[in-house]
Amino acid sequence: MRVRMLAAAAAVLALAATAACGGGSAGDDGTVTLRLGFYAAAGDPADTTMRELVKEFSAANPSIKVQLEVAPYVKFFERLRTQIAGGQAPQVWLSDGVLVQEFAARGALADLTDRVKTVNAADYSGIELNRDQKGRVFGFPQGAQTPVLFYNKKLFAEAGVAEPTAEWTYDDLAAAAKKLTKDTNGDGKPDTYGMRVYSPGFTESWWPIIKAFGGDIVTDGNRKVVVDSPEAKAALDWMLAAMGKDGFAPDYVTTEALGKGAVHTLFATGRVAMSYGIYARTLPAVNAKVDFGVAPLPKGPKGRGDVAIVNSWVVSKAASPAQADAAWKWITYFAGEGPQSKWARLGEAIPINKKAAASALPADRGKVFLEALDASTDLGTNAVWSEYTEALAKRVNEALSGATPVATALKTGQQEAQQVIDRFYAGQTQ
């Protein structure tokens, strides 16, 4: 249903563009009204910090009047899609990185390629991950996420296991995880597992593992699904063994029962000694006072499988020239070393300003995250990312739960995900 809505929305937007944001030109006194949207829960640290930065920006740019539009993540994007269809989107908003291509395909975003050429790209991370198959850039990075290997130093020391290194392979990971798995109360079930391998969010689970084993998920400009491969099967078989016969990871049912958010408490509460995690997972670990370190993802037959999501500022295609200029001024302000350093203190994302990242991230963890980010590919983003990954994840999860043979799940998942992509792109020129 949403695929048909995506195709229709561009036409609706074209008709309504002149209505966007109240007509959209500078006032008689030279002031520009800029509606700025971002997602955050009211009063949480991200909301508070963003408002502080907007206040600082407004003080430095008195000719730009910023109007904030804020809502929690799900509500924000539900409302935004309705605003886009009606030609009433904010002139600039913070987009989840995996959704930028969706909004671009709707015809909702201004092409920022020429504006990006005016900045020194070497000063920032993630710009290249935002290019589409035609080399265009529709979003400028705000913050990045990439998974690395989190490990509990206390549990490693207690088990007498050497901490992970950059040379670890998946065999090394499994060997250590087995030693770290403990049944302390004698009921025959582990109280502490060596590793969490499954997560409802595949960025920290099967996606990088498949890539490390030499498989891939999509190719050809992220429009061809290729997950049905011997390499992908080997990756899922490894995960099934970890949750089954090897017994060093909580199984699918146990993990899924925790819920998408609670699954990440497994590491913070010490129930698992290791876990793949994006930078945002440092915050619950720090708050729980876990003595932890991070290491690169282990090496598979074809590398580490590093992937990244780059949340990005985007500009409405319906913005007036004055509003678009004001939006770009906000974007480059936020990308500056000062605002990026302030945002980094939230522990919410890897700063995309390289100077800020070098000074603001803890030295023992920052290097690992930054090197992983530099080595990363994108997460298969395209105009129907949400739909095709949902179709694929459904089948992969059936395999990881043991409900469907791996080979069958990969074949079916590839077919169904490809159908989603083909339905949208049939006849598309953008």
Image (cartoon, helix red, strand yellow):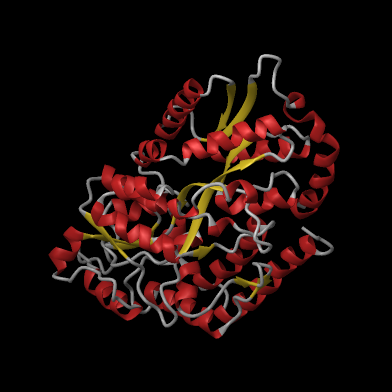
Q: Residue at x 22, y 46 (%)?
A: 289
Left or right of 56: which side holds 91? right
Q: Quadrant of residue 427?
A: bottom right
User: What percent of the width, then of the height, locates residue 63?
Assistant: 58, 20
| As drawn, 243 above or below 315 | below
Farthest-out residue, top? 29
Q: Residue at x 59, y 33 (%)?
A: 37
Depth check, front residue: 116 or 204: 116
- Residue 365 in sight here: yes
Depth check, front residue: 67 or 356: 356
| As drawn, 262 above or below 74 | below
User: What percent of the width, then of the height, locates residue 376?
Assistant: 46, 65
Left or right of 26: which side holds 341? left
Q: Residue at x 66, y 30 (%)?
A: 323
Quadrant showing the C terminus? bottom right
Q: Residue at x 47, y 52 (%)?
A: 260
Depth check, front residue: 87 or 53: 53
Count all numbered tags in the image, as a single digit.
0
Left or right of 115: which side holds 368? left
User: What percent of the width, then of the height, locates residue 317?
Assistant: 72, 41
- Residue 200 in sight here: no
